Image: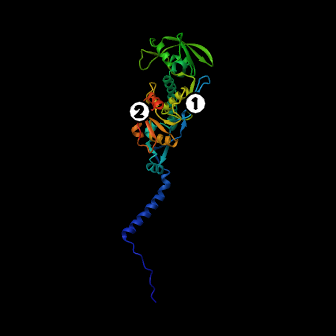
Amino acid sequence: METLAAPHRYVPPTARARRRSFWWTAVVLALLTPLAWLINLPYFAASAGPTDDAVDAVIVEEDLAVFQPEGELILLTVSLQPVNLYEAAIALFDQRIDLIERELLRPGGETDDEARQRNLRAMDRSKDIAIAVALSELGLEETLAEGVEVVGVFHEAPASDALIDGDLVVEMEAQPVRTVEDIRRILEDRRPGDQVQVTVIRDAEPTVLSFALHENPETPERAMVGITASTAYPIEIDSANYGGPSAGMIYTLAIIDLLEQGELTDGRIVAGTGTISMDGTVGAIGGIRQKLVAAEAAGADVVLVPRDNYDEASTAPVEVEIVAVESISEAVSYLREGKSGIIEEQ
């Protein structure tokens, strides 16, 4: 008896080769996937970070009247994570995430801890400026100034033997000192080596000190105290662990909204980002696309962005209204009145 073999299904060579290629690709990917988790790349993945109401971060002394707004002024952040090969591949297909070269964020081999300290210092400076600019916008800068707080003393300056961090300078050469500008004015005609007498508040007690003035490194013929300092006001900002200068504008608006009768937000959720300068200029920041994603997720009705960031902001995968501003006055004007000429929508 003859046994017949089961009929054999013919597979065209091209299909067979394609199938073999598919299975080999699958095998290679299966073998490489564990390795992809171990290969770190010199990039950070930038994604939307946490958000907070900036008004909640402003701390005002009890004897100062405040007007709590019904709306919110949302602070925006970016989350940065180092990536491996697998995570980078995922990020390339996610419009909400951008890959940024590590060298751009950690220049010169800077460590993560060094970068963190740098960003915290930038935040401290930004908060000081935000307070001063907000009070200037309200016409309260001189009224609420309490003196000049010593933040640091140059080791090479003669003042290092007299002043310490935390001293509050309230008088210099028998003239009252309320702001940093007062010190600059008093020293305008002095020369390095001249002796000066100051009164500081230290441990809640007035203390009289004398020391020689330091030489200004940039203009040696001019004198300086040899300190880093900021004008003290009855306002503080608790920035938690956030770093960098990009919250300057939103903190400035939060202080204005708290101290001014009425409401800037008009009950809206307003998000914003941008640096702030002493002249009120709003400067560009990094991570604008991710911050817009965070703003939309927080339910923002509108997002205020630096004008120099607007082109990039318009590429973010969001549908929230975007308003470009160049100064704190423009931002306040828009929030109060919605003036035309400063709003740019997608």
Q: How crowded is mark 1: few (under 14 residues within 10 Å), some or many (20 or more)?
A: some
Query: How many numbered circles does the render carry?
Result: 2
Q: Which amino acid does label 1 sit on?
A: Gln
Q: What residue type is labelled 2?
A: Ser
- The residue sitting at the bottom extreme is 1
Of 230 and 116, which appears nearest the observer?
A: 230
Q: Where is residue 190 in the image (x, y as percent from the top left)?
A: 46, 11
Residue at 49% from the left image edge and 14% from the top image edge: 213
On the image, the x and y values in percent for residue 93 come to: 44, 50
Judge the density around disc 2: few (<14), some (14-19), many (≥20) Cα neighbours within 10 Å. Answer: few
Q: Decide which of 346, 146 is in the foreground and name it.
A: 346
The secondary structure type at the circle numbered 1 is loop
Residue 2 visible (yes or no): yes
Q: Nearer the viewer, mark 2 or mark 1?
A: 2
Task: Identify which residue is drawn at 60% across, 18% down.
Answer: 202
Q: In which quarter of the image is the C terminus?
A: top left
The one of 156 and 238 positioned closer to us in this rendering: 238
The image position of residue 77, as x and y in percent, is: 50, 38
Q: Is residue 309 left or right of residue 145?
A: left
Which residue is disc 2 drawn over?
340
Name the residue carrying label 1. Answer: 68
Query: Disc 2 versus disc 1: distance between alpha carbons?
Result: 27 Å
